[in-house]
């Protein structure tokens, strides 16, 4: 049996424990893990250029580099990494890297961290055959703010849509694809948050590639709004643009971002009573917008999507090679699922006359309109092409930059109904 004094101590510490628990529910302290690749299956590519006589052409002049000490490579190339946080110098938004080749597969890399083209004071990275390596670039004003990029040797075809090497307009000589490197930006940090029994993955995205994660109006805080969705930089899939008063929703509770360190290591979310209006997300029902057709009349989106089981919104422009490349697949979908799928194409950047002629020449028989600013903003269109699939009730089922996901979804539905 507790003494009166013992009871008092017990009650006091119990009160502190409850208070701490309640505080933890009101505030979420986030600790973000190491830098990650946002989409592990997605890779870009880096094309090295031949270094001739130690000179590199820039927009305004040809500049000379200072070679590393005891440099003895038989063959030399250079490439650049898009990075906006470096020291002021010859290059405003890129960092130059030197490649010393002993063979196509074995090479050494020097990174011009201080943006002065003097590689004699830069450390070397040695990369052997079939190996990968990470280059970490540090923000000029904060060495803890890091922008890492992962590279690896990859077998590219001899000819690619981005060229096959040779002399460029500025006089530089692009190396053939056998010298190219696959690259992945690791400008994401993430953590797991649990609130009232529900678990979310929360991430930060250094959108302007400077090593910092707290740039207002540029960087993103991402939430996987559905357990089936990965973290995404798309607003419709849970991304939020940083602002001074940014609110997010976790398990039907509203939180305000009150602290975020520059290097993205930690953040704090505090519960808020402020009014929160969620952006349009996957799974939401779309508003009945008015769409502008190429004959300048308006049509109700709801009237169009209610006709069939599914409707695909396709955002495109003739200036976008990838947009035109998708048309064959969309025509196939329109034909194969004619009784289930309505296609609505919304064009950005072309005149109604051009769109009409293009449709006729390419035998595109779906509804065609001109993208208005209202519709573009409503759907948070961040690139072209964009493909959105909605059902007969207006629920958003898919949002991608190609039609493959929609094709897969329709095929799965067809298989399930057999």
Image (cartoon, rainbow, N blue to C red):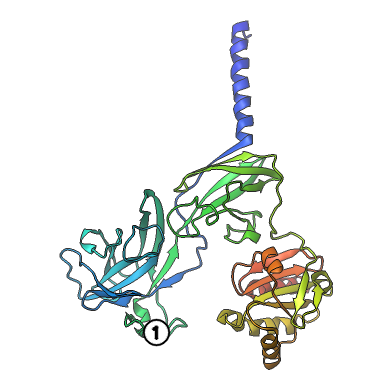
- Residue 374: percent from the left, percent from the top? 71, 67
In the orientation shown, which residue stands out farthest toward the left? Answer: 70
- Residue 197: percent from the left, percent from the top? 66, 41
Q: Quadrant location of residue 406?
A: bottom right
In the displayed structure, 207 sits above or below 416; it is: above
Q: Quadrant location of residue 348?
A: bottom right
| Viewer-closest of 76 and 273 | 273
| Viewer-closest of 357 and 303 | 357
- Quarter holding the N terminus is top right
In the orientation shown, which residue stands out farthest toward the top? Answer: 4
Q: Quadrant location of residue 182?
A: bottom left
In the displayed structure, 278 sits above or below 115; it is: above
In the orientation shown, which residue stands out farthest toward the front? Answer: 60
- Name the residue at 64% across, 47% down: 247
- Residue 326: percent from the left, percent from the top? 62, 81
How many tags in the picture?
1
| Viewer-closest of 415 and 331 | 331
Residue bearing the label numbered 1 = 164
| Structural crowding at the residue carrying mark 1, measured as other residues with C-alpha within 10 Å and reported as few (<14), some (14–19) or many (≥20) | some
In the displayed structure, 232 sits above or below 407; it is: above
- Residue 134: percent from the left, percent from the top? 37, 60
Q: Is residue 25 left or right of residue 145?
A: right
- Quarter holding the C terminus is bottom right
Q: Is residue 250 left or right of residue 417?
A: left
Tag 1 secondary structure? loop
| Viewer-closest of 334 and 321 | 321
């Amino acid at each position: 049996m507790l003494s009166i004094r013992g009871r008092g101590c017990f009650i006091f510490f119990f009160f502190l424990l409850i208070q701490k628990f309640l505080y933890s529910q009101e505030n979420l302290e986030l600790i973000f893990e190491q830098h990650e690749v946002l989409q592990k299956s997605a890779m870009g590519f880096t094309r090295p250029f031949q270094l001739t006589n130690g000179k590199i052409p820039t927009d305004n002049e040809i500049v000379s580099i200072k070679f590393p000490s005891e440099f003895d490579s038989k063959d030399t190339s250079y490439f650049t990494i898009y990075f906006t946080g470096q020291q002021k110098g010859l290059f405003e938004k890129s960092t130059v890297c030197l490649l010393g080749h002993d063979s196509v597969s074995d090479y050494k890399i020097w990174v011009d961290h201080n943006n002065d083209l003097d590689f004699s004071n830069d450390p070397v990275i040695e990369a052997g055959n079939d190996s990968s390596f990470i280059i970490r670039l540090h923000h000029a004003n904060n060495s803890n703010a890091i922008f890492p990029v992962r590279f690896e040797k990859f077998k590219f075809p001899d000819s690619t849509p981005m060229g096959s090497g040779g002399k460029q307009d500025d006089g530089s000589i692009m190396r053939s694809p056998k010298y190219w490197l696959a690259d992945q930006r690791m400008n994401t940090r993430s953590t797991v948050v649990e609130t009232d029994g529900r678990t979310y993955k929360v991430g930060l995205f250094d959108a302007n590639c400077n090593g910092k994660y707290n740039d207002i109006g540029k960087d993103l805080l991402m939430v996987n709004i559905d357990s089936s969705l990965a973290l995404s930089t798309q607003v419709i899939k849970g991304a939020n643009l940083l602002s001074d008063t940014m609110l997010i929703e976790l398990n039907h509770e509203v939180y305000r971002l009150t602290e975020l360190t520059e290097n993205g290591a930690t953040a704090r979310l505090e519960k808020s009573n402020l009014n929160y209006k969620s952006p349009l997300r996957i799974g939401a029902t779309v508003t009945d917008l008015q769409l502008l057709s190429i004959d300048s009349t308006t049509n109700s989106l709801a009237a169009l999507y209610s006709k069939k089981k599914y409707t695909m919104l396709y955002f495109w422009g003739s200036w976008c090679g990838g947009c035109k490349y998708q048309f064959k697949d969309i025509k196939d979908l329109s034909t194969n699922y004619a009784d289930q799928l309505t296609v609505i194409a919304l064009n950005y950047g072309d005149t109604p006359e051009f769109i009409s002629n293009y449709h006729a020449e390419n035998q595109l028989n779906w509804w065609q309109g001109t993208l208005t600013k209202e519709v573009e903003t409503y759907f948070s269109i961040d690139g072209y092409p964009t493909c959105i699939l909605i059902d007969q009730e207006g629920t958003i089922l898919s949002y991608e930059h190609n039609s493959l996901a929609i094709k897969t979804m329709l095929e799965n539905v067809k298989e399930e109904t057999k």
